[in-house]
C-alpha cells in the first residue's frame, strides 16, 4: 500500500503541507493491541506447548544417562560421547549428502519439468506422471524401491535379462552408492511436490511480462534466466526451504531400505537419534542427538530464510 | 487411572499380533489350572513395544504379563525392578517333571532368581529343501566335510547353497554364533560373558571359516530376504538356511509342503563339538501388575503339558518341556536329533551379552558380510572387542 509521507516530493509539489493528522487515540491503540494479542495467543500457546516445551524437556533429558527405567544426571557427557563417536561423523556426512542431493535433484528437476510442461499440449500427461509418486506414502515408496534395488531385485534381474549382467550392483550394500540411490528414490517421489509448487509460481507470472520480454527479443534460455526465474523467486524460496528442512529430517526411506546399514554406513542424524533412543534404549543420548538435529535444522532454516527475506526486503525498498 | 482386566482375565502384552489365537488357545487350558485365561494385547513394532513396556511398567497402566527376551535383555529389566521373581514357577516345573533344564534356566536368572518362564525353546538348525537335496543326490550331512560337499554340489548346479541375509538386520549374528559356538562352546560362553576377547584365536578361526564359505560361493547375497525364502525352497532354487525352528510355520504357511521341508543340526567345524544355539522367549510377570497373584498363578501353570501342547501346537515350535513336541514333521525331526545327540546348549548371541554391545556388534557383522575378507575380519573383531571393553564397563558401572 502506498503511504503519502511528508518526505514525499509529490506532496511538496501539490501545495501547502496538509495539517499533521491527530496522534493515535491511546484507547483504540490498546484495543487494537488486545485484538492482535487475542489472535496471536492460540498460535503462540500451541507453539509453546507443542514445540518449545517438548524441546526443553528433550534438552533436559539429554543431560541424563537414561535407560527408560532409571536415569542419572551426567551433565554434558552425552554430547561429549556424541561428538567423539566416529559414527556421528558418518551420520553428519550422510545428512549433508541428503541436503545437497535433494536440493540438486528434486528441486531442479521440478523446476525444469514445470517450465518445460507448463504451456505445451501434452504437458498435463507428463505432469501427472511425475506427480503420481508424490501421492504415495514414504513406506510404499521404500517397499517398491527395496523390491527394485535388492541384489536379487528387479533392477539387477532386468540388467541380466537384457545382457547387461556386468552392470549389476549390490545397490544398497555399499557406501556411498546406497545413499545416492536412496536420494534417487526420493527424487522419484519428491519431484512431484516441487513441480506443483513451481507450476503455481509460473501461473502467477503475468502474461504481459512474458509478452513484453518476447517483444524485446528474449527467447529460450535467456527468457528463462532473465525473466521467468526471477519471477519465480518467492516460490523458489519456499521449495528450497522445505527441501532443506525435509532432507535434514530424512528417516523413513533410509530406515525401510537399509535400516541405516550395512553397519551404520547409510545412517542420517534422524536415524542415529532413533537407533540410540528406541533400539538401544539410550534415551539421554538419543535426546542429545535430537537437540543437535533441532539446532542444525533451525540454524539452516534461519540462515537461509534470513538471507532470502533480507534480499526480498531489499528489493521492496 | 487404568483398571484391572475383568474377572477371570489376565492381560499379556507382546510384540506379535499373530500370536493372539495361540494365547487364546493356551488361555483356555490355563483357565481350569490357574483360574484365569489370557487376554493378549500386541504392539507389532519391536522398538515401540520395548519402549511402551519400559515406560508403562512402573505405572498403573502396565499389563499383568509381559513378553520379553531372555539372557541379558531380561537381566536389564530385572535389575530395574519392573518384573517379578517367578523362581517358584521354575521350581514347580522341575518338581512336576515338566522342565528341569538348568542351561535354559540360567538364561532366565538374575542374581540367583528367575524373572520369567520360557514361552518356547527354539533351536538354530539348518532347514533344507528335500527336493533340492534329491536333485543334488545328497543326504543330510553328518560331518563338516559332508556339509561342505553339499555346499559345493549346490553351487556347481547353480542352486544357492545357503540363504543368509543380515546385511541390515540382526540375522548377521546367525553364522557368527554358530561358528564360534561350534568351534568351542566354552569359549562362546566366556566370550559372551565378557571373560574372553573377540580378538582371540577361536573368533579368528570362526571368521576365517565364514570367509571360506563365502569364497566357496556358499551364501546368497547378504541382503536376501527371509520372507522370500519359502518360495525359493518350494522352487528348489535355494538348498539350505540356518535359522530358528520358530520359522517352521512360515515355511509351511507359504508354499513349502511339510514333506519337502527338512531340518538338521549343523555338524561342528573341525576341532569343534556338537553344540546348538537355543533361543527362548520370556513370559514375565510385571512387578506392578494389577493382578499380581493371578499373573503368578498363570506363570506357575504355563509349563503344564496341556498348556504347552496347545501353545506349541499353534506355534509349531519346540517347548521348554521336552515331552511336548508339536505334530509337525520338521520339528519332530529336530527334537529327535536333540534327544539323540544331546548337544550342549548355548544362548542365542542376541541375548547373550548386554543389549547395547550386541546391537553394535551385529552392525559390525553386517558390514563384514558385505566384505567378507580376512582384513575386514580382523577389523571387525577389533571393533567388536573395542565395543565390548566399553560396554561391559557401562553394564557393570
Image (cartoon, coloured by chain):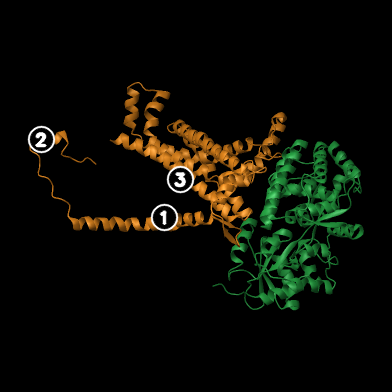
Q: Colour of chain B?
A: green
Q: Is residue A301 left or right of residue B60?
A: left
Q: Are marks 2 and 1 on the same chain?
A: yes
Residue B30 image offset from top left, x and y in percent? 74, 74
**Residue at left offset 83%, top offset 60%:** B328
- Who is closer to the viewer here, A130 or A19? A19
Q: How many marks?
A: 3
Residue picked out by circle 1: A47
Residue picked out by circle 3: A298
Residue picked out by circle 2: A14
Q: Is residue A54 above or below residue A192?
A: below
- The disc, 2 or 3, on the residue closer to the chain's N-terminal end is 2
Q: Secondary structure at mark 3?
A: helix
Q: Secondary structure at mark 1?
A: helix
- Who is closer to the viewer here, B385 or B49? B385
**Mark 3 or 1: the one toward you:** 3
* The disc label shown at residue B173, or none: none
Q: Secondary structure at mark 2?
A: loop
Query: Any idea which chain is the orange one in this picture?
Result: A
Quarter of the view holding residue A230: top left
Q: Which part of the image, by quadrant, shows the C terminus of chain B?
A: bottom right
**Mark 2 or 1: the one toward you:** 1
CA–CA distance between discs 2 and 1? 50 Å
Q: Is residue A230 above or below residue A274?
A: above
**Residue at left offset 68%, top offset 39%:** A173
Q: Chain of mark 3?
A: A
Let me know if residue B35 appears in the view: yes
Let me know if residue B166 appears in the view: no
- Who is closer to the viewer here, B274 or B111? B111
Q: Is residue B78 left or right of residue A96?
A: right
Amino acid at each position: 500500500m502506498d503511504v503519502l509521507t511528508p518526505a514525499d516530493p509529490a506532496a511538496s509539489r501539490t501545495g501547502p503541507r496538509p495539517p499533521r493528522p491527530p496522534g493515535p487515540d491511546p484507547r483504540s491503540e490498546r484495543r487494537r493491541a488486545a485484538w492482535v494479542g487475542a489472535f496471536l495467543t492460540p498460535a503462540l500457546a500451541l507453539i509453546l506447548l507443542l514445540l518449545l516445551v517438548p524441546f526443553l524437556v528433550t534438552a533436559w533429558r539429554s543431560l541424563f544417562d537414561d535407560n527408560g527405567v532409571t536415569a542419572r544426571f551426567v551433565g554434558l557427557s552425552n554430547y561429549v560421547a556424541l561428538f567423539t563417536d566416529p559414527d556421528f561423523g558418518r551420520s553428519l556426512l550422510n545428512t549433508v549428502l541428503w541436503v545437497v542431493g535433494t536440493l540438486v535433484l528434486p528441486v531442479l528437476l521440478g523446476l525444469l519439468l514445470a517450465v518445460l510442461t507448463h504451456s505445451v499440449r501434452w504437458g498435463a500427461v507428463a505432469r501427472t506422471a511425475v506427480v503420481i509418486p508424490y501421492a504415495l506414502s514414504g513406506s510404499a515408496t521404500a517397499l517398491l524401491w527395496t523390491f527394485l534395488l535388492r541384489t536379487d531385485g528387479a533392477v539387477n534381474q532386468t540388467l541380466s535379462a537384457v545382457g547387461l549382467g556386468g552392470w549389476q550392483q549390490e545397490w544398497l550394500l555399499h557406501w556411498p552408492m546406497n545413499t545416492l540411490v536412496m536420494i534417487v528414490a526420493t527424487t522419484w517421489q519428491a519431484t512431484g511436490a516441487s513441480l506443483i509448487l513451481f507450476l503455481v509460481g509460473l501461473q502467477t507470472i503475468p502474461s504481459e511480462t512474458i509478452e513484453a520480454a518476447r517483444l524485446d527479443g528474449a527467447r529460450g534460455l535467456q527468457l528463462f534466466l532473465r525473466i521467468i526465474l526471477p519471477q519465480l523467486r518467492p516460490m523458489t524460496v519456499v521449495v528450497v526451504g522445505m527441501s532443506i528442512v525435509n532432507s535434514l529430517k530424512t528417516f523413513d526411506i533410509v530406515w525401510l531400505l537399509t535400516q541405516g546399514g550395512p553397519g551404520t554406513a547409510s545412517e542420517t542424524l534422524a536415524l542415529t537419534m532413533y537407533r540410540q533412543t528406541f533400539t538401544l534404549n539410550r534415551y539421554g543420548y538419543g535426546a542429545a542427538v535430537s537437540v543437535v538435529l533441532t539446532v542444525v535444522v533451525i540454524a539452516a532454516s534461519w540462515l537461509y530464510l534470513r538471507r532470502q527475506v533480507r534480499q526480498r526486503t531489499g528489493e521492496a525498498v | 487411572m487404568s483398571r484391572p482386566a475383568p474377572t477371570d482375565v489376565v492381560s499379556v502384552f507382546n510384540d506379535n499380533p499373530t500370536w493372539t489365537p495361540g494365547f487364546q488357545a493356551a488361555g483356555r487350558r490355563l483357565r481350569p489350572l490357574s483360574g484365569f485365561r489370557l487376554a493378549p494385547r500386541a504392539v507389532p513394532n519391536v522398538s515401540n513395544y520395548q519402549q511402551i513396556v519400559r515406560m508403562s511398567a512402573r505405572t498403573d497402566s502396565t499389563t499383568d504379563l509381559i513378553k520379553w527376551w531372555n539372557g541379558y535383555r531380561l537381566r536389564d529389566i530385572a535389575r530395574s525392578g519392573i518384573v517379578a521373581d517367578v523362581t517358584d514357577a521354575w521350581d514347580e516345573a522341575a518338581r512336576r517333571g515338566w522342565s528341569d533344564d538348568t542351561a535354559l534356566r540360567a538364561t532366565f536368572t538374575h542374581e540367583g532368581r528367575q524373572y520369567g518362564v520360557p514361552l518356547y525353546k527354539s533351536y538354530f538348525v539348518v532347514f533344507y529343501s528335500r527336493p533340492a537335496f534329491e536333485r543334488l543326490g545328497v543326504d543330510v550331512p553328518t560331518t563338516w566335510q559332508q556339509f561342505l560337499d553339499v555346499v559345493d554340489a549346490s553351487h556347481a548346479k547353480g542352486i544357492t547353497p545357503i540363504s543368509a541375509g543380515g546385511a541390515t538386520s540382526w540375522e548377521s549374528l546367525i553364522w557368527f554364533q554358530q561358528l564360534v559356538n561350534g568351534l568351542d562352546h566354552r569359549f562362546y560362553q566366556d566370550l559372551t560373558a565378557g571373560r574372553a576377547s573377540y580378538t582371540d584365536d577361536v573368533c579368528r578361526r570362526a571368521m576365517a571359516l565364514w570367509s571360506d564359505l563365502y569364497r566357496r560361493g556358499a551364501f546368497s547375497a547378504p541382503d536376501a530376504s527371509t520372507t522370500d525364502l519359502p518360495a525359493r525352497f518350494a522352487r528348489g532354487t535355494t538348498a539350505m538356511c540356518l535359522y530358528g525352528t520358530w520359522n517352521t510355520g512360515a515355511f509351511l504357511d507359504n508354499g513349502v509342503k511339510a514333506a519337502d521341508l527338512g531340518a538338521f543340526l549343523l555338524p561342528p567345524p573341525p576341532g569343534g563339538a556338537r553344540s546348538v544355539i537355543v533361543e527362548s522367549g520370556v513370559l514375565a510377570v510385571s512387578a506392578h501388575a494389577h493382578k499380581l497373584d493371578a499373573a503368578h498363578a498363570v506363570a506357575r501353570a504355563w509349563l503344564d503339558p496341556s498348556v504347552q501342547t496347545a501353545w506349541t501346537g499353534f506355534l509349531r515350535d519346540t517347548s521348554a518341556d521336552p515331552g511336548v513336541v508339536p505334530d509337525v514333521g520338521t520339528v519332530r525331526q529336530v527334537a529327535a536329533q536333540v534327544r539323540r545327540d544331546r548337544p550342549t546348549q548355548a544362548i542365542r548371541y542376541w541375548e547373550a551379552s548386554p543389549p547395547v554391545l550386541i546391537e553394535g556388534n551385529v552392525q559390525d557383522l553386517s558390514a563384514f558380510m558385505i566384505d567378507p575378507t580376512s582384513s575386514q575380519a580382523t577389523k571387525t573383531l577389533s571393533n567388536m572387542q573395542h565395543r565390548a571393553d566399553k560396554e561391559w564397563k557401562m553394564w557393570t558401572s
